[in-house]
Amino acid sequence: MYSSPPIPLPFIVPPVRRLTRWALLLASSLALCGCLGLKDHSHSSAVALSANQLETKISLADTRVSALSWPPEQWWQSFKDPQLEQLIEEALQKNPSLKIAEARVNKANAYVQSIQSISRSQIQVAGQITQERFSGKGSIPPPFAGSKNTAAGLQSNLNLDPDFWGKNLALYQSALDQSHAVQMDVLSAKLALCVQITGTYLQFAQAHQELDLARHSLILQQDILALSKARWEAGIDSELVLKPIESSIAQWRRQMAQYAQLIDLYAHQLAALVGVGPDRTANLKVPHLTFTTSLEIPSQIPAELLGRRPDILALRWRIEAAQNEVTAAKKLFYPNVNLNAFLGFQSIGLPGFLQNRSLTYGAGPAVTLPIFDGGRIRANLSDRQADLDIWVEQYNEAVINALREVVDQLSAFRHLTEAIKQLQVSYQATDATRHLAQIRFQEGIGNQLEVFNIQTQLLNQQFTQLELATQQAQLSVNLARALGGGFETNKAALVPQASSPSSP
């Protein structure tokens, strides 16, 4: 059977090149029309704050400054408690919230790949074989018209978006920026989890110490009751003295039960934060924490704070993404150019289906320019610019709150340190009084009941000291979080290159 020679490729390519040149010429002409659509469009007015606009000299005037005072990456190790360190290490591996955040990173990366595929050549191959009766009055010529036969087709289609105006590139950059923002969200989630575990562990430790103090208070009240009964039996005191002491003993027993309940609740909360069952924390040891008594701040506040907070960096990335979304929205005013080509075989009847005479091919550009769209494209641009304004103002709000959080912790720590100092003075005075009362009792001048009453005052002051010390430790945790929790921009590649994100 005769078969025709294959058609050489040069006979196909030159027409494609000529059509492409015509498409470019037409697109360039129509692009001028797109520029007119942008001429009178309003721009975003929001501008991101810079560090130089936020004054903190007065607020931080009484705070010790050190260039090395940024919190370390594992800041919780300053408490020197191996049990706490183990819980945090385990939580970073098992906590479901972190796994959700990491899954969002995978989703964002997949979206980046899907956007990136838009600018790549799209090739599809389709084939079909159909047994049918052709119409006698249709487009099918004789002798096939009005007969039954097999229609066969095999065709490959090529579609290419040259992205002359950079719309697809802007969308890709936006998706990439969103992916970076989500990765910053993971770091923020890790920091928040470590802060939660440390804060709960501090309360867990406080409950243990309060239970111990309540136990000592109960024993002391029992000693007071025994002494008061002896004085009543000796006729020195009235029976009325005994009832308040018995009531106090019952109250301390109730307090001990409440502290024991708190210990269990905090243990269960720690297990949930770690991402395990309650049995994991059922037998935790009594914590032994080392508390800090002074705080220092880095000398580069507020300049470097903006690059040390993962949550702020996430907002900066979202501003970058929104800027690229605005760029892509502007490109919709320009003509859209696509290059299409196809190559395949079509035949009525299977004999000769894959021969050159069944070959079909074609190529050409497709150019579209929206002229009358009811304002859809302009509204879309306004929507993207409004999104950009929202992200910029959210960034500004986050920056202001970040500085407020630092100043709040330092101010609270300063006032709390003074309160602890005065409480220590009061405690020393009360302890000196107890010592004198003990001497008077030993010399037979005073009675032991006076010593017991002063010891009760000392125990009450120890409760207050414990509460203030825990608050002080919590403030140091909050300051570590406010300073970024050890995140360093020079160790992370995911930092926006722009020095100050702003709306165009």
Image: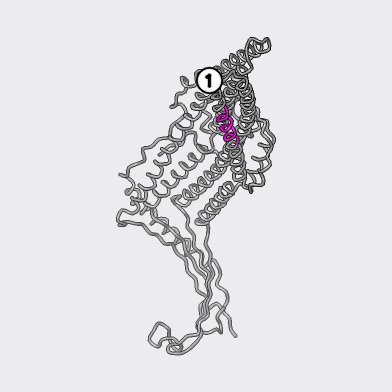
Question: Magenta segment: does it hold 248?
Answer: yes
Neighbor class of circle 1 (other Cα within 10 Å; few <14, some 14-19, many 20+) is: some
Q: Identify the image quadrant of residue 440.
A: top right
Residue 198 visible in this rendered orientation of the protein: no
Relative side of 11 to 223, left or right: left
- The image shows residue 415, relative to residue 125, as above or below, that is above
Please state which of residues 72 and 51 is positioned toward the viewer in this rendering.
72
Please state which of residues 390 and 113 is positioned toward the viewer in this rendering.
390
Q: Position of residue 447 (x, y in %)?
A: 63, 15
- The image shows residue 387, relative to residue 63, as above or below, that is below
How many circles with numbers are drawn on the protein? Answer: 1
Image quadrant occupied by the N terminus: bottom right
Point out the stretch of residues depicted in magenta.
245-256
Q: Residue at x 40, y 49 (%)?
A: 329
Q: Which residue is drawn at 55% across and 30% down?
A: 247
Name the secondary structure under disc 1: helix
Question: Magenta segment: does it hold 276?
Answer: no
Colouring mode (rainbow / by chain / secondary structure / one colour): one colour
Task: Tell me the amino acid under the disc marked 1.
Answer: Ala
Q: Where is residue 334 in the image (x, y as percent from the top left)?
A: 38, 52
Residue at the spot of label 1: 419
Relative side of 264 to 34, left or right: right
Please state which of residues 336 and 72 is positioned toward the viewer in this rendering.
72
